[in-house]
Amino acid sequence: MPGGSRHGGAVFHRARAVMNLLACLHDKAPVIEARDSDLGDLFPPGFLDLYEVHSYRNAARILAYACAPEFREITERLMDFRIRTEDIVASGGNKSQIAKSMERMLNPLGWNETRIRGDLFISKIIVTHEEKRRVAGKNRGQTVTEQRQREELYKVNGFIDGHKIDFVKDRVSFDLEWNSKDQTFDRDLYAARTFYECGIISAGVLLTRSAELIPLFTEIARRVEMKNFQNKYGASTTWMKKLLYRLDAGRGGGCPVLALGIRPAAVSDFEEWKNAHPVIRQAATFDVDTAAEDEDDLW
């Protein structure tokens, strides 16, 4: 027993040493990220004051150089884009005033909602080999192998089934998620990667809310009668953090994605609105890190 105990202890210490070595190696392993570390000077002056910007798989550079006219249209329109506080407070519906404002800005420039559908056709090439004995000619009596092939065609209906993006122009897609369930990001990223893999777009842009809006939303919650305001814009809705988590996890596939988050500077009338709406409650907090029930599904 004493010898067995010593042997067991030695095995334990060796295993622990191996685990420590692996942990050390893991800590030193270089990190591979799809998020670009440098945005350069690709955006117009003042853009980063209005929007939080994250570029994945060189999306910003692809847009700025390979899709320059479309990139310029998006950035110029976003520089002019503003949100009114009343639009934040407004009750739900199938489409918010913020989404409608974006449509009015982009539709006249040729940015339109676009869907793609497609069936998959599969060619199955079957190769057969058959041995035959020559019955005539110079090689009579010899066995030879003849190779033949035939093709069978198969079809998968609806292999690409109605993937939709809010705005597409030329080779750029643009989606706005102001206030939807955060699972909507999965739909958007799947649509973008499908468009990309089909060769329809070179990069996608996704606009949502920056977490920097939380203090502003907290002030609104203290000044409005809406009991469900905090749930309406709660943790289970479309905040930038929920989008970055999905992009870091690779859910955009190989599609270059530019993620933009609306900052408080884009809310044009907040100070005036505060002056007109006194505080009616002291306690109001927003916790966007904790999942919350949210029955609204706004776009």
Image (cartoon, rainbow, N blue to C red):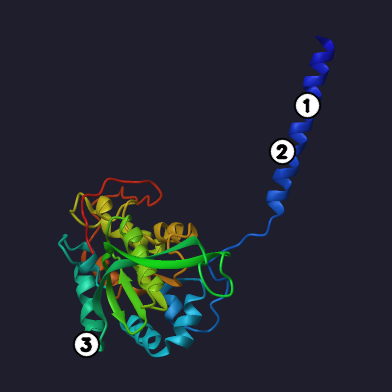
**Cα gap from disc 2 to disc 1, whole angstroms:** 12 Å
Q: SS class of the residue under badge 1?
A: helix
Nearest to N terminus: mark 1 or mark 3: 1
> Which amino acid, by three-letter code, is at mark 3?
Pro
**Residue 243 picture quarter:** bottom left
**What residue is shown with label 3?**
108
Q: SS class of the residue under badge 2?
A: helix
**What residue is shown with label 1?**
11
> Which amino acid, by three-letter code, is at mark 1?
Val
Q: Nearer the viewer, mark 3 or mark 2?
A: 2
Residue 104 position in % (x across, y down) = 20, 81
Q: Is residue 101 above or below residue 261?
A: below
Return the residue nearer the eye: 159 or 285. Answer: 159
Q: SS class of the residue under badge 3?
A: helix
Q: Nearer the viewer, mark 2 or mark 1?
A: 1
Return the residue nearer the eye: 294 or 116. Answer: 116
Residue 282 position in % (x across, y down) = 30, 49
**What residue is shown with label 2?**
19
**Residue 155 picture quarter:** bottom left
